[in-house]
Amino acid sequence: MWPPEELLRVSLEELLSRPDEAFQEAMAYVLTKNAELYRRLATT
């Protein structure tokens, strides 16, 4: 059996290693908007 501190550490590492769905969606939105902006700036 693992000590509680080790279980907490492993749980936190797992949580931090995989961003939640809302963050993934926000990041995709920002990257898409940035791509659109840079495309527009390149054509002006």
Image (cartoon, helix red, strand yellow):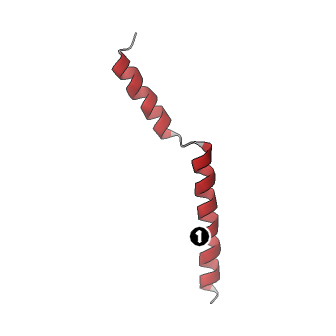
Compared to residue 9, the image places residue 3 above or below, namely above
Q: Nearer the viewer, residue 44 or 4?
A: 4
Question: In screen coordinates, is 28 left or right of 16?
Answer: right
The quadrant holding residue 3 is: top left
Question: In screen coordinates, is 23 left or right of 10?
Answer: right
Label 1: state its secondary structure: helix
Compared to residue 42, the image places residue 6 above or below, namely above
Residue 36: % across, % down: 65, 73
Quick one: which residue is furthest to the bottom in this view? 44
Residue at x-position 58% and y-position 56% = 27
Residue at x-position 38% and y-position 28% = 9
Which quarter of the rendering shows the C terminus? Answer: bottom right
How many neighbours does mark 1 have within 10 angstroms: few (below 14), some (14-19), or many (20 or more)?
Answer: few
Look at mark 1 in the image and give the residue it sits on: 34
Residue 1: % across, % down: 40, 9
Q: Amino acid at mark 1?
A: Asn
Compared to residue 41, the image places residue 16 above or below, namely above
Residue at x-position 60% and y-position 55% = 26
Residue at x-position 37% and y-position 17% = 4
Question: In screen coordinates, is 44 left or right of 19?
Answer: right
Residue 13: % across, % down: 43, 34
Residue 2: % across, % down: 38, 14
Quick one: which residue is furthest to the top in this view? 1
Task: Give the tally of numbered discs.
Answer: 1
Compared to residue 3, the image places residue 36 above or below, namely below
